[in-house]
Amino acid sequence: MTAFSKKKLAGAVAVVAATAIALSGCSAPSPYAAGDGVLKLGGVLPLTGALAFLSPPEIAGVELAIQDINDAGGVLGKPVEWTLEDSSDGDHPEVAPASATKLLDAGVDAIVGAAASGVTRLIIDQVTKSKTVQISMSNTAPDLSTWDDGGYYFRTAPSDLLQGAIVGNQIVADGHENVAIIYQQTPYGEGLEAKAKATIEAAGATIVSDLSFPEAETNFDTIVDQTVASGADSVLVISYDEFKKAAAALQKKGFPGKDIYLVDGNLANYSAESFASYLEGAKGTLPGGKLDEAFKQRAADLYKANHGEELTEFAYLAESYDAVILLALAAEQAKNDSGEAIAANMQSVSTGGTKVTDFAAGLAAIKAGEDVDYDGYSGPIEFDDNGDPTGASIGIYQYGTDGTSTLLEVVAGNSVE
């Protein structure tokens, strides 16, 4: 964080607390802004738009975390409250700011989202300047690490400095020497393209074509024609839902489906698409490791009970769940639900101290006077001064004949280098 790090925020709070103790000679008042005693969370998630396929697992993760928290006694002895609003996507830039305004006016203590890095850029100043915590489960753009957010922005997904390196290395490891990249012209696409390109070239392969497209593009004929004409033996597609159009165009042009590489924004279930079998052998990357099956089932059961629909996507399920648990632990440790109090305690509850893997254990440890270190379903997390998880894993997946992908392996690495 260029102007104000989490460590600086925590340090400033500590100085205030120490001064209060010295002046009072007895007990110190809370160094934080006053909370109302109820942890109120708001969601700005893609109910519509190119990333709408990600909202079910993200909503499921949030709702399961809130259920677990409230079943354990809630935060500060009261149930967590949750309000969900739409973020849409970058092609509808008016939606997310309006949703954030609605939630801030309602007095939420923290906002979960947005899903897309580009959409977060539309609201991050609005949210953090109001001293409200913002935490995303799926923002991956590298530039968000150093955003001037006053210490109020966090994410449980790793920066694309990690995913870009892993997908780039995978392409070269598979024997490809002439690589094409087709990428979305957004902060997400540009950041991931830059890291993947640098990794591929450093590994000795050549980028023979590097073409961008605007978000929500529907016609990929020209881009695919140029990609094929470049002599590419593989293509990395960095997109959201636009991949459906890109894949159809690649198939029509006769490009081998097995030589396509995807990323988290488009690693989806394509079993209902006409090109489902065409993707056999294609690979993709997704932040996170192998999900606990019991955890997935609990989330799926709750989502069906709450929304009447089957949960078929699980991307960022764990990161969403962990984001909410960390917010709750931070508020409980601070004994205050204000945004200022939560922000000052997020790093503390994710690093050092007694290891806990669920809210109930964390709550018990905090009540016993212990500092906690939460390790979640998405990994150890361990926020650094910029609110980034310092260690993370990326799963490498491969598509079968039915348009769905299975996990091949999990690669661990440092997400901030």
Image (spheres, rainbow, N blue to C red):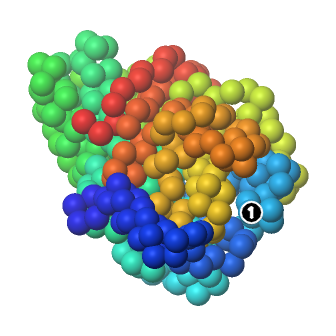
Identify whether 17 is placed above or below 416. Answer: below
Which of the 4 image quadrants contains residue 47? bottom right
- Spot occupied by residue 3 in the image (x, y as percentages of width and height): 23, 66
Q: Which residue is drawn at 39% across and 78% down?
A: 129
Residue 252 visible in the current orientation: no
Query: What residue is pinned by disc 1?
Result: 76
Answer left or right for 374 relative to 10: right
71 on left or right of 290:
right
Image quarter hosting the N terminus? bottom left
Q: Which residue does the image show at 62% across and 55% down from the upper left? A: 333
Q: Quadrant of residue 181?
A: top left
Within 10 Å of disc 1 (Cα), the crowding (few <14, some 14-19, many 20+) is: many
Query: Which quadrant is home to the C terminus?
Result: top left
Depicted 166 relative to depicted 240: above or below: above
In the rendered image, residue 384, in percent from the top left (x then y), is placed at 37, 45
Name which residue type carries label 1. Leu
Residue 106, x across and y down, in percent: 64, 84
